[in-house]
Amino acid sequence: MDGKESDSGSDSGIPIRGLDDLFKERRTLNKFLETKNPFDNDKITRVYQKIFRFLIEDISTLESRGITRGYLQPHQIMVAGGPDFEFMNVWLLNRPEEDNPTAPTYREQFDSLARMILGERDAPNLELDNFLHITASAASGEQRLFDFKQLQWHPLLFPSTAKPKLVYNVFSYLGLEETLSWKKDFRQMIQRDVEVRDTVLGVDVDYFSHVYNLKGPQYYVENALGAFLFSANAILDTSYYIGKAFKEYMKDKENLKEPMTQEQIFDMLISFFPHVLIDVYDFLVKKGISIEKISEDLCYF
């Protein structure tokens, strides 16, 4: 291990890296908080998504070794990265080798840390509220069997560009790897009434009515499952729609609207069904399905 790594105060907590230049800017999390706002337009920033994912990984690793108690204070967490923090590393300066029975649980500490950093914002945020509900339940012991690593794959910590692929990956996985009974399980586990038909047919966008009419109301039932199925199929057909619409637009720019982008389509789907990502996440967790396995081809760090 080189000298730079030992300067941080913990030999065991820092993996050996050959990319020192990428991680030359180092500061404790409390100093990081002084200069880096965790929100941008009421959305958690990519940098803080990474910080929380690293911490969840560390806690999961410690729990796998039977170490469930210890301290997780901002001045005991090191954040390292280049000037723009595109490449990052986060580690605990006080990483223990054994459990500390007099300390609070790491889950309690993580819940407090998340609330301290993310608890105040100007606008409602469904994903954040759900995330904090889960961290509170895990901290209280209500979810003792909850695999803490699953928090890494919570929608709050996904970059926006990866969210459409997540919906499609889950849809594909359930259709190929699981039995057809998953739809029945989804309806039972995620009981939410959703106006699917009136929502997607009530906007002046032919693409959404096209997707809906291909299968119709018997397929897109008026609940959380129907919203998930519609979102997945809309994402599946996006590339074909954009290609076809663009060709038509190029032939008649004066009379046709410029086709929507994939990002615009997904943003509209989320505005239609704001709970869909949370519902999908909750379903996978309740079923004990590894979200990491489904999402292995997506990039987060």
Image (spheres, rainbow, N blue to C red):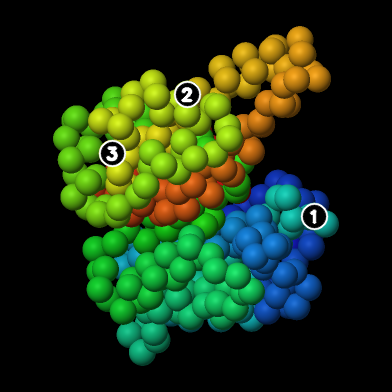
- Element type at mark 1: loop
In the orientation shown, which residue stands out farthest toward the bottom? 102
- The amino acid type found where label 1 is placed reads Asp
Measured from the top left, where is residue 40 in percent x and y?
71, 62
- Element type at mark 3: loop
Q: Is residue 252 left or right of residue 186?
A: right
- The amino acid type found where label 2 is placed reads His
Whichever of labels 1 and 3 marks the residue nearer the N terminus, that label is 1
- The residue indicated by pointer 3 is 221
Does the residue at mark 1 contact the one at mark 3 (Cβ under 8 Å)?
no
Q: CA distance from mark 1 to mark 3?
A: 45 Å
Measured from the top left, where is residue 32 in percent x and y?
72, 72
- Occupied quadrant, residue 31: bottom right
Point out which mark residue 299 bears: none
Q: Is residue 38 left or right of residue 252?
A: left
Is 90 situated above or below 292? below
In the foreground, 141 or 205: 205
Point out which mark residue 210 bears: 2
Can you say which quadrant of the picture contains the N terminus? Answer: bottom right
Measured from the top left, where is residue 276 in percent x and y?
41, 48
Whichever of labels 1 and 2 marks the residue nearer the N terminus, that label is 1
- Occupied quadrant, residue 10: bottom right
- The residue indicated by pointer 1 is 84
Measured from the top left, where is residue 233 in percent x and y?
43, 28
In the foreground, 211 or 290: 211
In the foreground, 176 or 10: 176
Q: CA distance from mark 1 to mark 2?
A: 42 Å
